[in-house]
Image: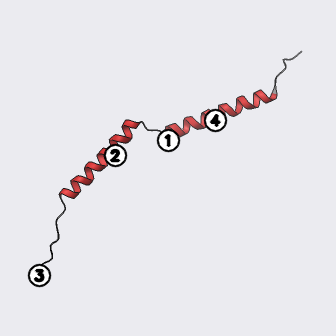
Amino acid sequence: MGDLINLRQVKKRIAREQAEKQSETNRARFGRTKGERKHDERAAQHAAALLDRHRLDQETSAS
């Protein structure tokens, strides 16, 4: 005689496995550590500051 299985439990287990696969994919695509985000933010701020320091002031000449 075969083993009895609870279909509700099997469906839930399958759903959990699929959700875990999806979350793993999302972590690989979008996941970045807090340090990586801060590093990128600091690099963007540094680039903006560097650009501002090299900006030429446009003075209007009164002729």
Q: Residue at x 67, y 31 (%)?
A: 16
Q: Which of the two discs, 3 and 1, labels the residue nearer the N terminus?
A: 1
Of helix, strand and loop, which one carries label 1? helix
Tell me the element at label 2. helix
Mark 1 lies on residue:
29
Please give the label number shown on residue 41. 2
**Residue type of the residue flagged with mark 3:** Ala
Q: Compare marks 2 and 4 and give the one earlier in the sequence.
A: 4
**The label number, if any, that marks residue 62 in the structure image:** 3
Using the image, determine if residue 46 lies above or below residue 58. above
Percent coordinates x, y for residue 24 in the rendering: 55, 34
Q: Which residue is mark 4?
A: 19
Viewer-side label of 4, 3: 3
Give the spatial CA distance, label 3 vs label 2. 41 Å
Q: Nearer the viewer, mark 3 or mark 2?
A: 3
Q: CA distance from mark 2 to mark 1?
A: 19 Å
Left/right placement of residue 58 relative to residue 8 reads left
